[in-house]
Amino acid sequence: MRQFHYSVQALVGLHARPAMVLAQKASRYKSRIDISYKGKTVNAKNVMEILTLRAHQGADVLFTIVGEDEDLSALELLEFCKKNI
């Protein structure tokens, strides 16, 4: 299991466009990828679930990754987040 925290930088928070690109990126990996915020955990591969988090700009979200490619996916998702959300 790999975990990392990320502070959302996008002005609109983790809303439609940022949620869509995150779900697309997460779907490329075999591992289970979850995002947690304020006690709620959702599947990062599902854009509709991500939207239910209502994570605003500055929100500290926790990514939890479990599976065969967890090391690679954690590393690449963190870099992706820094550039896109």
Image (cartoon, rainbow, N blue to C red):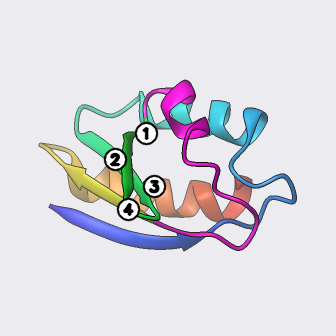
Mark 3 element type: helix
Residue type pointed to by label 4? Gly
Dot 4 or dot 2, earlier in sequence: 2
Residue 48, x across and y down, in percent: 55, 26
Pick the front one: 59 or 65: 59
Dot 1 or dot 3, earlier in sequence: 1
- Label disc, if present, on residue 44 of the rendered structure: 1
* Mark 3 vs mark 2: in front: 2
Residue at image mark 3:
76
Distance from the alpha carbon under mark 1 to that under mark 4: 15 Å
Q: Is residue 25 left or right of residue 81?
A: left
Residue type pointed to by label 3? Glu
Q: Residue placed at 54% from the left, 39% from the top?
A: 50
Residue at image mark 2:
34
Residue extent of the magenta highlight? 45-61
Residue type pointed to by label 2? Asp
